[in-house]
Amino acid sequence: MSTEAVTHPTYGNWRRPRRPGLGPLGLVGTFGVFGGLVVTLLASLISLYAALIVAVPVVVFLVPLAIRTQDGRNVYQLIALRVGWWRRKAKGAHLYVSGPLSARPGGRFRPPGLLNKVTATEGRDAYDRPFGVLHHPARNLYTIVLGCDPDGGALVDPDQVDVWVALWGEWLARLAHEPGLHGASLIVETAPDPGTRLAHEVLPRIHPDAPAAARAVMEEVVERYPTASSEMHTYVTLTYGVPAGQKRKPDDMISDLAIRLPGLLGGLSSAGGGSAYPLSAERIAEVVRVAYDPAVAADVLDARARYGGTGLEWDDAGPAATVETVNSYQHDSGVSRTWLLTLAPRGTVRSSVLKGMLEAAPGTRRKRVALVYRPIDPATSARIVEADRRSAQFMATSGRGMVQARAASEMRAAEQTAAEEASGAGLVEFSLMLTVTVDSAAELADAGVVIRNLTAASRVLMRPADRMQAAAFTCTLPTGILPWEQTLIPHELQEAL
């Protein structure tokens, strides 16, 4: 009898584009090196003392650019982060109070921070389904939120999983051709199931004349169900902007998004998303409300089961009070901490690489994993992969020994990326953020241990978003906040640093 080996598809070949410039200096540091050399040589024509006076400040300026952390940040960026935190704390911006007893106009519970100026409207798609649209006035961006119920990988053939992954990659590649799309995100939220949905479905259906044993079994199932299961929600956000040089009214943007929705939902369903549907403005407000106050999750589920909705508006979806510290974010009935991706899994991985991270974590109230995508248009993709390919070839031919072996591996990956891009594949920048919410600050240490175990099993490296916990918490909500759209320094200039 012969046995046939079962092969499981593997994935990978994601890589960070090489930073332009000499080594870790970046483009700005490289210009500083050559400019400093020229000025120092000219000063040496005067005297050696003049050359030292010029060279010392240049070296002092360049050394912080050459010292970098594991995720690529230099000393200047670390200093800017601390200075920004000190300024916010001095102004009291790390505290937030809303509601009728606060000094904020209107006396409502508006979401804080990056969501404070956001407004919510609603439209109707081609199937007359309501969908919410979040308008970010600071950048004039519009966000729609899609919900889906993924089929999952349990008892599914590897070939079918491979098809789903291929269709998901195709869906992401098509986003690069979406007019005005600035970014997308996939949020998977998990939490212990309070069991209210099962209780509302089972208990009213128990017949009064049912046998006592059957009644006891059903009541025991309803009682123990929350301890053995968890609820999971999956959201996809798409954030659009008005093309440069055009002026469009919000109603025109809503009509445009309504036309695009059926195609987006169809592609999401075929990529393993299961039943995909747009979220209404009320549903978006409920998700945000539960994120800031996890204690009301059971009440929200109960109201939806009983009355079909809560009637919650966006202006009342925020918390009553929040306090941001260096390494945590306290909001109503929860305390959260967010981690940021520093290194994606190296080498090849299987489709289940993030399975443990996406499942509900024991000892936590809620957990959200957000994958943030920045699609790149085809013209820019070709330029990036060709520049990366040339850089990899240079490193492979200029090194020796182990350095040369690693550079040769990177060159093969760059060649494969260039070939796939030339054949029509899309290029997407991505990152990962993870937020854990617990009941008290004392539980954050245990939650941190759980997260370290989960990230180690998923072969990813993450760091806490210290001194920007409030903003990072907001980025993991399905509200369309894109990190690169919230920075004072343009994305291109940050890459040059």
Image (tube, rainbow, N blue to C red):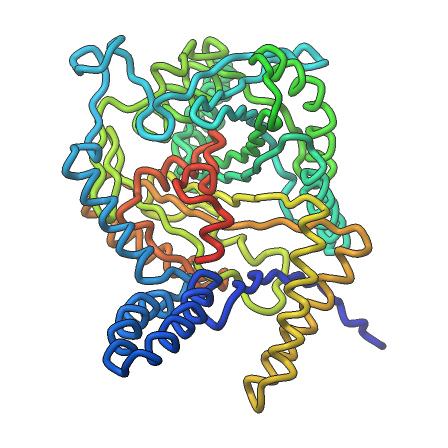
Q: Is residue 461 left or right of residue 448?
A: right
Residue 356: image location, x then y, percent: 49, 54
Residue 359: image location, x then y, percent: 48, 47
Q: Is residue 278 above or below residue 170?
A: above
Residue 396: image location, x then y, percent: 63, 80
Question: In the rendered view of the protein, which quadrant contains the N terminus?
Answer: bottom right
Q: Residue at the front extreme?
A: 46
Q: Is residue 100 above or below residue 244?
A: above
Residue at position x 77%, y 72% from top? Answer: 5
Residue at position x 54%, y 24% from top? Answer: 142
Residue 32: image location, x then y, percent: 41, 66
Residue at position x 61%, y 64% from top? Answer: 349
Q: Tell which of 148 and 472 is nearer to you.
A: 472
Q: Tell which of 275 and 81 is nearer to you.
A: 81
Q: Is residue 205 above or below residue 115?
A: above
Q: Residue at the right extreme?
A: 1
The answer to whether one can see residue 188 in this image is yes
Q: Is residue 365 above or below residue 53?
A: above
Q: Tell which of 182 and 202 is nearer to you.
A: 182
